[in-house]
Amino acid sequence: MIERVGDIVVVKLPKDICFYESKALTAIDKLGKLADELHKTNGGKIKGVLLLQEGTASDWHCDWVAELAETCMFNDLVYRIDTWRWVLSLIRNSPIAWTYAAAADCRGSSWELALSCQHRYWFKANALLGFPEINIGVFPPGGVLESLNKRTGRTRERWQSSPFCTASEALDDGLIDFCSEAIDWQVEATSIFADILALSPNSGIREQRRKRARNDFISVDSQSRRAAYEEIENVWRQEKFGVASGPTAWDYCWQLVKERAKLKNPSDLGRLISLIAGRYLLSPAYLIWLQSRQVAYGNSGALSTKRSCLLPIVIDLSQAAPPNSILVRLLHAPIQIIFAATDGRDLLAALNLQFSRLERTLGNIAAQYLWERGVTWYQGQAKNSQSTVLSWTHDDCLTITINGSEYRFLRLDGNAPTAEPGLMEFFGIDDNLPTSTQAIVELVSDGLLKTQANSTEIPLTVQIRSLFLDEMLRISQYTDGDLTTVASHLKNAGWRFAGDGECWDRFLRTRHSGLSSTKGETSGSWLPTYNSDITTWRFAKVQAKRSNTVAEARWNETAVSQHFALFLGRLAELTLAQDIRRDQSATDFLCASALGLPNNYGTPLTFLNQRGRRRVEHYAAIHWPHFQLTGTSNHGDIKT
């Protein structure tokens, strides 16, 4: 909505929108016409434009995910990126001041719009701003980072090291101009903007009329295109052995920015970046990441931490210390953290180790500030504390104890010191977590999956991983009974958890110590049974050696990887078919995260569909005798 308030144009931006999706074209067109008209008239009677962001702005919502998964075409996406770049360029080089104002989180394409404005006002100090997609290698293609790189040094290093920041931190870094709290923030923003225009109407303006390139790939000069391909090839050579997943759009685009002098026409840079970024936005890696944000954050946007529900938190050091990223989150909350251990020597060693890790992560000054402000400790039993007690184990478990009630979770990403918060799976009798427990979960994870819709006490992650291990044992007959070879093939093909013997040991400890009260031999009412007697990875390798080998049918790395991608797809299909409370994105993400499906396969169900139903059923009849698919429904009646 665009309205005139005196000599200021006020634009209220649409809610829940990614500026690269189709439904954003109308809003972009209106912004573009406004910016272009102001260029032609040199502002005319209008002195400034105020953009108001209503609610949280991010690219994590269902419309954008569905469009990427089903209808988005490459050429259309490149055209939208190119159009968006042009609009942002008009705003950055406008003859009058544009100001972006908000009182909530701002991420992704909306943050590109904010950075393109000459002024930015924020009315929520702890609002999160930035480009979270940088963490998975996506390059923000709107042209903002290239523009910043011309004026300030180390732009790449700054955003790669910290894609996120709070509004108060952004104020210190000069990314925004104002940060405060206000109840009626829209009126306050209008008033501040009007005062600034009265005092200094040309503040921040660097007018420069830009010429727009044609909207087709042919318009890119052949020499520039060839130079771009050479730089992409150089990045690939440098990066392919250093990073398991290979170079990303972030690597390619920054190399182009660095070598733009090699382009015959430097204005082609934007068009080439649009092409590279468009391909990466359509990649399975980006789609899986978006779906994971959906699962983690639901339809309400960002997690809203209920800090009023949080008491001082006691961390029990009798088993394991929390991962660095989670401790940083807790200290930034801010919440008082109390470390506790029964042995004084263990307590001292753990405190020193924890601070040194914090120091490596944040630097000495920031670590010391957070430590002195938020950390205390005592020697004694943590369970005797009246506060909330958090306990990490050396495997994948986290326990939250509040008012004598204990809630246990499985952490899909493990509890290693360098682990990210990630997702957790809740398992237990009580399916409705108290508000205080949910507030803790929001701090120590990126989201929660409640997968116990059926009456089994065994977490779905355990079932899926156990069945997968059984299948690895069976497939070892095609690798001379060597289970390590199967794991190595999976690891080389990009499978994270499934190719790591240490991860399997962690999982087996979790299953046998954490689930000792359950039967452990049945995997639910619809999934096949699994062997619960295997207690260690070493024992699993011994079991594989005892199997009958099939020497005439050896499987290579590709065969093993594709077989397990199909197998995991069937497990996801079984789960979805029998559980009407779980949607496809949550099921796919759970199965993929539980075992580390490679990004190039997409999601399990997507890969299954791409292989063709009849082809998969024929394959299943040969390789999975315990799966019998009958009937003609979407998923079939699957008997075990």
Image (cartoon, rainbow, N blue to C red):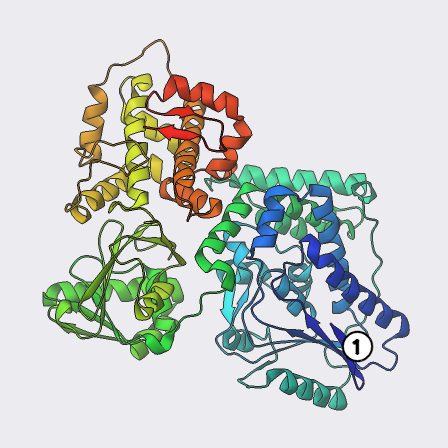
Q: Where does the image place residue 44, in percent across and percent down from the top left?
A: 88, 79
In the shown orientation, is residue 331 left or right of residue 128?
A: left
Question: Going by the picture, which residue comes out furthest to the top?
Answer: 552
In the shown orientation, is residue 90 left or right of residue 533?
A: right
In the shown orientation, is residue 40 left or right of residue 265?
A: right
In this view of the protein, which residue sits in the foreground, 586 or 471?
A: 586
Question: Going by the picture, which residue comes out furthest to the right?
Answer: 41
Q: Which amino acid does label 1 sit on?
A: Ile
Q: Is residue 394 above or below residue 360?
A: above
In this view of the protein, which residue sits in the foreground, 212 or 514?
A: 514
In this view of the protein, which residue sits in the foreground, 420 or 242?
A: 420
Exactly how many numbered labels are in the figure?
Answer: 1
Q: In this view, does 636 lie above or below 276?
A: above
The residue lying at 45 percent from left, 42 percent from top is 588
In the shown orientation, is residue 15 left or right of residue 362?
A: right
The residue lying at 78 percent from left, 65 percent from top is 30
In this view of the protein, which residue sits in the foreground, 327 or 12?
A: 12
Q: Where does the image place residue 362, in percent across and percent down from the top left?
A: 39, 66
Q: In which quarter of the image is residue 233?
A: top right
Residue indicated by mark 1: 96
The residue lying at 32 percent from left, 25 percent from top is 485
Instruction: Please state, as top left, top right, bottom left or bottom right, where the C terminus lies in the image.
Output: top left
Instruction: Please state, as top left, top right, bottom left or bottom right, where the N terminus lies in the image.
Output: bottom right
Q: Where does the image place residue 509, in percent across and percent down from the top left?
A: 20, 44
Q: Where does the image place residue 6, in percent across and percent down from the top left?
A: 80, 86
Q: Is residue 78 above or below residue 58?
A: above
Disc 1, SS = loop
